[in-house]
Image (cartoon, rainbow, N blue to C red):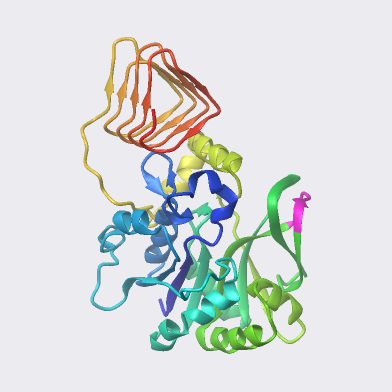
Amino acid sequence: MNALGIVFSNIDDKHVAEITKNRIMASIPFGGRYRLIDFILSNLTNSGIIKAGIITKHNYQNMMDHIGTGKAWDLSRKRGGIRVLQPYDDELRETDNRVETLHGISYYLDKADEEYVVLSDCNLICNISYAEVLKAHQKSKADVTVVYQVKDTEANWKGKRIAFDLDQNQHVTAIRKTSHTQAGDALYLGTMIVRKDMLKKHISIAIDKGYKSLVEYWANHSAELSIQGYEFTEYYAYIDSLESYLNSNLELLDLNVREELFRKPYRPIHTSVNDSQPTTYGKDAIVENSVIADGCVINGVVRNSVISRGVKIEKHAEVSNSVVMQNSIIGKNATLKHIVTDKNVV
């Protein structure tokens, strides 16, 4: 595939500040054994994209320990592969300024041979074929293609979500920000495809005009640019708060959601392998409708929860509707309901 991936690894950290104090959005654990970046990297390689630039600023050691050489995603290569990009200088700059961030990695874009760029955030969980998006982008001959999904219910968001107005040909006619979406709204999924040369050209223009958001720049120049929408109709979860993080994990308890994410033909979700012994269940353990990773010791009660590797739940403890990150200990007689624990906590 004639495209490279650019991943914004920590641009949305502030939305889940409770669990990004010592890590970035990309390395947040998910589903007991995955990290959020696993979904983006898997989507890239499953689509034939073998070059990925990961933009980050700080606290990225956990992410790099997880990614390693990129072998788990077939990205350990002499040509292509993964590269960590740090576009920020020593002065404190706004890490959510996408235009300035992209301007700061112009050296990386200049050296790339690929014709197209896939830009993606890290707070979106889905299994998507970028190859299909690029095919639609080329067919439409649009300047920019943005990925969206039509919301079937009303929703309130912690921050602002980007919504599109589209005509019958899927052309974007207006772009707006909202914290409350109605049923039928087309919500931006943090992913776009654009020709590399055009991206570089318009980044320079946007910098000169003082823009921070690339989408806002597209919106204010829609009269002179062709912006095409690509509707993604499969499962996705958007993390913009601790509550949405908890809920998206618990949605994995639904078999249909697991099938949507992890059972797509030729589109597996890869992660770094961490071999450990099977989970041990004590004679008094009760486990119902839960995801339990390897290496745990369960002697208490677990219901409707996601338990990561190496967790110990002692006798008479009860965990329900919760997410427990790796190597945590839930002590005797403790009760957790609708709780997210960080890793290595008691």
- 312 vs 229, nearest the viewer: 312
In the rendered structure, which segment of residues is drawn in magenta? 178-185
Quarter the N terminus occupies? bottom left
Residue at 50%, 29% (x, y): give it.
322
Instruction: Please state the horizontal and vertical placement of residue 304, each as a whole percent of the image.
Output: 49, 26
* Residue 292, picture quadrant: top left
Magenta stretch containing residue 278, yes or no?
no
Residue at 73%, 82% (x, y): give it.
221
- Apparent side of residue 242 relative to residue 290 in the rendered image (left or right): right
Residue 215, can we see it?
A: yes
Instruction: Please state the horizontal and vertical placement of residue 305, each as a whole percent of the image.
Output: 47, 28
Residue 239, can we see it?
A: no
Measured along the vertical axis of the image, is residue 42 above or below residue 325? below
Instruction: Please state the horizontal and vertical placement of residue 181, each as a whole percent of the image.
Output: 76, 51
- 69 vs 262, nearest the viewer: 69
Magenta stretch containing residue 180, yes or no?
yes
Measured along the vertical axis of the image, is residue 201 above or below residue 338? below
- 113 vs 337, nearest the viewer: 337
Quarter the C terminus occupies? top left
Q: Hey, which residue is sitting farthest front in the picture?
A: 91
Residue at 35%, 35% (x, y): give it.
344
Measured along the vertical axis of the image, is residue 228 above or below residue 315? below
Residue at 34%, 17% (x, y): give it.
314
Measured along the vertical axis of the image, is residue 93 above or below residue 124? below
- Apparent side of residue 83 relative to residue 151 in the rendered image (left or right): left
Instruction: Please state the horizontal and vertical placement of residue 220, each as a whole percent of the image.
Output: 75, 78
